[in-house]
Amino acid sequence: MEFTLLLILVSIYAISLFIGLFKQEGIATYVLYLGFILHLAILIIRSITAHHPPFTNVYESFLLLSFLMQVKFLFFQGTASSRVVNLQRFVVLIFTVVLVILPAETRAINAVMPALNSPWMYIHVPAYLFSYVALFSGLILAIIRLFSRKNIFAYDAQMDTDISLAMIFMSVGLVTGAIWGQISWGNFWSWDPKETWALINIIVLSLYFHKNDRKAQSLIVILAALTVLFTYFGVTWLLSGLHSYS
Amino acid sequence: MVKILKYSYWILTLVILTMLALASIFSPALLSSLGYTIIYLLYAVFTFVSAIFIPSFLSKLLHILLALLIFVVVFVKSNNDRYPLALGEGGHYMLKMENDTLNIELLDFTITHEDGSASAVHYNSTILINDMDTVSVSVNHPFKYKKIRLYQSSYGNITPFNFYFNDSLKLFEGQYAEMNGIDFHFLEFDPLLQRAAISYNDILFYLPVGREISFLDAKIKILPDTGEMGTVLEYVEVKGHTLLLVIAMMLLLTLIFVRIRRR
């Protein structure tokens, strides 16, 4: 049932993007709202069925991440050009396609590990999700910025805000994770692969504030997004460690 | 001078990123090595100094936070003593501290499984402290005593060993015991060589399984018992938290100082 709903969701997002590409903005937005409601329904069904919030494994967190991105693009975005809007729709579509092609066992509902039964999970994980939402929002602007020939760019301030937010939430995620690690494992830091790559992410992202050149900043954002994607998928499946479930 | 600092910061950042990425994939043990630790500290210092040159107060604060986090990681990792304690029900440990000892006994170990699933959703060790207080240790809920912490680490099938003197004494790896008035520490069992590593007054000796050997005026023998489900706690002796707080305060005061001078 959930998989069928996911396929419908992908189709709706794809239709919305397709209509948007033909400049039918009004219809595209209505279709997108329909997809948004379905996305929310999938999350609610998942939470009720699993008896826990939808961020205890890769599949659930990616489902929530793509939803939060949609929330940001639909409700917290100022006026944006159709190029930006279409790219945003494309990114959310790709994220939902990834959900469909993830191995079936990742969608299985499992019991929450004892280590995750902590109030810190409700700060640590959402902080990282908010950070990734801001980062991927900044990534879209960075990609457009990188290929723009104009020197004055309308979204520079927006990109600064997004990356600052990403950095703030990433710092909150890293610090709360360290505190949680101390409570749960007696260690602020274990050099677990996920922790190491979380540090790599924040170091890469911090470089953004050391450059004034917009092209260089855009490249840094793209690099940061790639390292985040590796942390999300590469580390989870290629490098085992304390965070192997996430 | 500022330019040199900036270039050095960029080079150091690229070096640390490459080192972290390669080590996490190919050799995770390197991440806590001395060479890496020096690079982390150097990077933390440069991050802290670089924060001064960033105009935005928020970014400045985040950089200082990052520097502080690296200090914490390096400091805590290098200072805390830790080792696992595997215990079956009824098993004892005597934890030796400076001017103090802590006797612990596992009274009960319970695992809760989700209906129809093999994975544990909760596991809990009930331990008796110094034959007086009963405390509960579970994941996210450690036992704290002065600088000592006992964390619920994992569980599994663990093998106790019977040490034969006049009577038999059941010991798990890592346990201390008093035998014939002598304090022993059963460090670990080597399954390959089939021998137990034991320390007595900081002197290490090995005791092969099944063979009777003479030690001081006693003859001792060790035989593995049948495995039983037991708990694995992690013993941690926390050191240097006060120093960490001092470092944190110094960093914050420097930040405030820089802020006031700018104004």
Image (cartoon, helix red, strand yellow):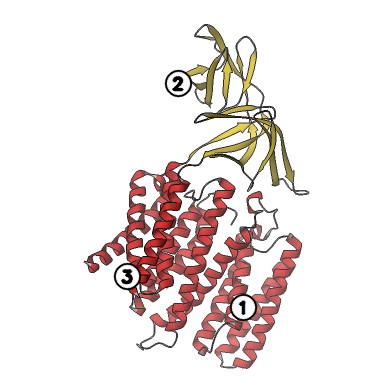
Q: Residues within 10 Å of mark 3 (few under 14, many from 20)?
A: few
* Secondary structure at numbered mark 3: loop
Q: Amino acid at mark 1?
A: Val
Report the number of discs: 3
Separation of residues labelled 1 and 2 (CA atoms) = 63 Å
Tag 1 and tag 2, C-beta contact below 8 Å: no
Q: Position of residue B52 (x, y in %)?
A: 33, 68
Q: Amino acid at mark 2?
A: Leu
Name the residue carrying label 1.
Answer: A71
Name the residue carrying label 2.
Answer: B204
Residue in view at x 66 percent, y 51 percent: A113
Depth check: give the residue in front, B201 or A101.
B201
Q: Position of residue A166 (x, y in %)?
A: 49, 70
Q: Which mark, residue B246?
A: none
Q: Amino acid at mark 3?
A: Phe
> Which chain contains the residue that carries disc 2?
B
Separation of residues labelled 1 and 3 (CA atoms) = 36 Å
Q: Is residue B207 above or below residue B54?
A: above
Residue in view at x 58 percent, y 57 percent: A246
Q: Position of residue B35 (x, y in %)?
A: 33, 46
Q: Which mark, residue B53?
A: 3
Discs 2 and 3 carry the same chain letter = yes
Q: Is residue A147 above or below residue A128?
A: below
Q: Is residue A181 left or right of residue B78?
A: right
